Amino acid sequence: MSEGVAVRLGPTRAEVLDHLRTTGGPVDVAEVSAAVGLHPNTTRFHLDALVEAGLVARETEARRRPGRPRVLYRAAPGHRANRYQDLAAAMVRHFAGGVEDRGAHAVLAGEAWGAELRAEQERAGALPPLERVVGSLDALGYAPTLLPGPDTVVQLRPCPYLDLADDDPEVVCQLHLGLVRGLIGPGEGWTVTAIEPWATPATCLVRLAPVPEVAAADA
């Protein structure tokens, strides 16, 4: 991945990505260009940057008739809307209006969101906390990976809220911190120590640590 890719999406690139998410299927440069009102060359520039960042997939049209196959683009897997994303998007837009301590409010909202998801999973069957976190985040489109190493780190890629995070990262990232806390729940032996937005141009990191009291009791 090139270091030249912007860490945050600008409004034009976010609009291009949003169109691909909304469209769903693969589309060519001409269709995206017409939808967002850009010159095809400019559109292709933004699409290629999104591909390099891992947010868009590029493919060649399967073509049986004569002629050069088109290059098609689609949003990378994980960019799918659901009722929780709609709720979070509305919350972010509200908090962006200048509510005091909006980051703290976002953490609380994320914890409530995560607690709801945790309750749904517990009704279906208990899971270990880390497995529950990774499974839930995967279902929400974050493509999480539990990274190997001495520290417990969950990598999120891509962020389904990247365009919203560009407008107000404090709210969106604190929402995610609360979400993971809510998914873990109380008394499960883990705590979220930090969230690192845009650790790379296309990934964020969530750092977790065992709770010493619980770890000692389980020893």
Image (spheres, rainbow, N blue to C red):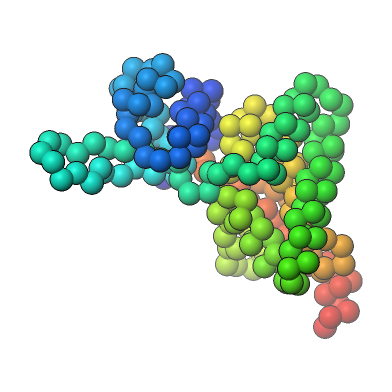
The residue most toward the front is: 65
Q: Tell me the quarter of the picture where residue 154 sits.
A: bottom right
* Residue 100 seen: yes
Decide which of 211, 99 is in the foreground and name it.
Answer: 99
Q: Is residue 39 left or right of residue 102?
A: left
Q: Residue at x 30, y 44 (%)?
A: 59
Q: Tell me the quarter of the picture where residue 219 sits.
A: bottom right
Q: How many marks?
A: 0
Q: Is residue 123 left or right of residue 2?
A: right
Residue 116 percent coordinates (x, y): 79, 54
Residue 40 percent coordinates (x, y): 31, 21
Q: Residue at x 59, y 42 (%)?
A: 81
The residue most toward the left is: 66
Decide which of 172, 64 is in the foreground and name it.
Answer: 64
Residue 216 percent coordinates (x, y): 86, 77
Whether residue 212 is situated above or below residue 53 in the rendered picture: below
Decide which of 185, 23 is in the foreground and name it.
Answer: 23
Q: Residue at x 62, y 51 (%)?
A: 140
Q: Is residue 40 left or right of residue 170?
A: left
* Residue 153 seen: no
Q: Tell me the quarter of the picture where residue 27 sits.
A: top left
Residue 75 percent coordinates (x, y): 45, 41
